[in-house]
Every structure is written in C-alpha cells, then in structure tokens.
Image: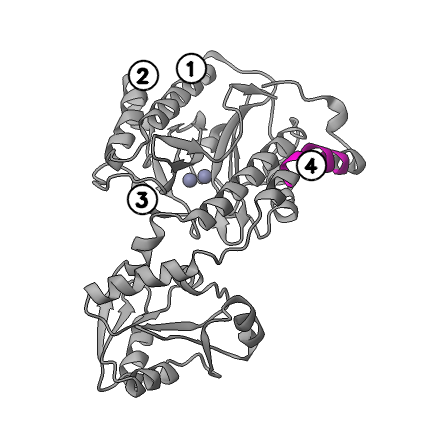
Amino acid sequence: MSGRGDEKRHGTSQCQQALTSDLAPHTSQMRGKRRKVGSEKARRLGRLRNLMERQNLDALLVTNPDNRRYISGFTGEGLLLITRDDTCLVTDGRYATQAGLEAPDWRALPSKTLSSKALAEVCREQHLTRIGFEKNDVTYQQFEKFQADFSGLELRPVLGLVESLRLIKDVDEIAMIQEAGVVAGAAFYYAIGHICSGQTEREIASRIDYFLRSRGDGPPAFETIVAAGERGAMPHGRATPDKIRSGQMVVIDFGACCQGYMSDITRTVCIGRFDALQRQVYGVVLEAQLSALDHVRPGVIASQVDEVARQVITGAGFGDYFTHALGHGVGLNIHEAPRLAPKQEIALEAGMVTTVEPGVYIPGWGGVRIEDTVLVTETGCEVLTPVAKDFMVL
Ligand code: ZN
Ligand code: ZN
C-alpha cells in the first residue's frame, strides 16, 4: 500500500489530527462493544470446581497472576483459595480497596506479608485436607512456606488446571481480544501514516506505543518490535536508534491490551522502493499465512496448520529460514496455549485464539513476517487484527 502524503509526516498538530480523525470510527465501534468482564465469572468458577472434584482436591491455591485474574477478576498481588463452597483472597493493605472493587464476591483476608497462613486456617476450619497448588508457578521458597503454613494437610501439585479453562475463550474474553485487535489495527495505520526514511526504529515504536497507551486501556502487550533492513532477520529485534532507509523492509510487531486481554500483529513494509527478492519473499510468506488461515478450523491438529505454512515456504526454497513456530495462543498472556508448532497434537476448538505468523529470516539480508491474531470459530476462523496484507511500499 502506498499513498502517504508528505503533509502527514511532520508536525504535532497534524499528528494529533490524524490520531483523532483516523481513529474515531474504531473508537466508537469499541465503545459499543465495551463490556465489563464478569458475566462469565460464575461459570468459570463452576467449571474449575468440576476439575478440582475430578482431581480429588478439597481446595486449590491459585498463585499465577493471570489465573488469579481469570478466576477472581483481581489484578493486584495476592493468593486465592477456592474450596467447594468458599472463595478467599489474601492481599495486603496496598490492594484492600482494589480487591473490594475487582472481586467483591470474594472473602478478603488481609495479611501484611501476603502469607498463606490465613488460607491454611480456612482449610482447617472447614476440614479440608487435600490442597492443590500450581506447581509450575510456585518457587521452591514459596513451596517451603506453604509446607510450613499447611503443615498437617496434604499439599498436591497440580499442572494447568486453570490454564485448561483459559484455552477456550468465553464471550467476555473474545470481546476484549477483539477490542485489542481493533486498537492494534488502528495503531498500525496511525504509525505507517507517519513513517518516512530518516526516522529511527525507536521513533516508530514510540509512536505505536503512544497510540496503544492512549487508545487501549493498558501498556503495549509486549515491547514493540521495529526491525529494519538486516535487523529484520532477528525475529525479536528490539527497536534501536538506527535510522530506516529507502530500500529497506521493516518488520513491525506489536500488540494492544484491553482489560488484560491482548492482541498480536506483525506487518512488514518496504520503505521507498523494493527489489525482486523482497517482493518474492513477501509473496511466499503471505501465501503461507493465507494457506494456514484457510486450514484453521475446529478438529484440525495444531501441528498440521504449522505444516501447511511450512510446506509453502519450503516449497519456495526458504524452509531453512522459517525458524520459529507458526503461532501461539493469546489471551491474558501474550504466549499461551495452544501452540501451532511441529509435534503439537492438540485439536483446535471453537473459542481458541491463536496467532498465525509465518516468517522468513535471512541473515545479512533481513526478514519478513506477517502475523494476525485469529479466533477459531465453528466453521473456520475470524481474523481479529483488521489490517490489510498487500505488499506495502511507503
Ligand atoms: Zn507478534
Ligand atoms: Zn506472536
């Protein structure tokens, strides 16, 4: 896509104008969709209790911050205890008011040191003996503390209990990720409306971050990647003070955050002019991405989707340069299940959200990646990052 007027390149007032006018439709669309996460909370708790029962647990300690937010809505520091008919939250004075606002139905147990002692007391009072804890989240030091606090009770390590629920997004979550996708899409158009040779990677990244902060409701989903020319061969190249030049390709990868839920998008653009190899590689990556998107639907095995994209890139002779997995789940965390990668045998299900992001990275030359965040639907998938994928020369 070309067509960026010089008049848009400079000046704060024009930038401000672009920010206001380019985004008005997106903003009003988002307001219509904006809703409070909450209507699904009771259902999440019910499903978690079913899983606990199946694992023969009387109670579950939740320490992982994303899991804590998912189950309770509380975004501060603290510990959760879920029993068959009680929900308790330990936090300290910094978060007392916040806990009341975010998790009003949870019984708050104040603790100066975020200790699990009070939760152990609850278990003893209610004669609960088999207490699960998240073994992939607890440090050895914290485990020792739990052992002391829960002495006489049985601590059972569990893996991926809440995460297995988070795998399938409910309507509240999908609405948030959709909103984060719309904000990211608008941020991209805002940023490319101001790109020109001579700007630094950092300036471009800062413009995107400014937009994400002012239009989303949180910080960027991760450190925005802007990698020009040879640096594009690093899939996670950090934005540097280097100036972009005519004839370079620039990989731009970022995400927005809405009420904790994230989006993830990459586009690769050319500055000023391009050569045959740049055009060729872009075409191969785009074909790989579109072919993979065509295969995303319920019942398809994650590794098969990866394989579809890999075959396109390999068939064009660039297989050795596609050096990462095709995609990753997105939600409260920017990298969560499911992974679209070789050997991933999980079958896709409606409600999963994943990225599809093939790339070709040639050392000494540069890179091309095209990434969208997509929702698996009953019949296929819906792209949640609404940005064109034509070969763009700015
Ligand atoms: Zn990305
Ligand atoms: Zn990604």
Which residue in the protein does label 3 denote?
338
The magenta-colored residue range is 16-27
Callout 4, which amino acid? Ala
Label 2: few (<14), some or many (≥20) within 10 Å?
few
Which residue in the protein does label 1 denote?
280
User: Does label 3 or label 4 sit earlier along the sequence?
Assistant: 4
Picture layout, residue 323 above or below residue 282:
below
Callout 3, which amino acid? Pro
Q: Is residue 167 magenta?
A: no
Picture layout, residue 170 above or below residue 363:
below
Tell me if label 3 and label 2 are in contact, CB under 8 Å. no
Q: Secondary structure at mark 3?
A: strand
Q: Secondary structure at mark 4?
A: helix
Q: Closer to the camera, 364 or 172?
A: 172
Residue 248 appears in which quarter of the rendering?
top right
Q: Closer to the camera, 148 or 23?
A: 23
User: Does label 4 or label 2 sit earlier along the sequence?
Assistant: 4
Residue at the spot x=25%, y=61% of the render? 159
Q: Is residue 18 magenta?
A: yes
Which residue in the protein does label 4 denote?
24
Q: CA distance from mark 3 to mark 4?
A: 34 Å
Q: Closer to the camera, 175 or 188?
A: 175
Q: Is residue 242 visible?
A: no
Which residue in the protein does label 2 denote?
316
Q: Nearer the viewer, mark 1 or mark 4?
A: 4
User: Does label 1 or label 4 sit earlier along the sequence?
Assistant: 4
Q: CA distance from mark 4 to mark 2?
A: 42 Å
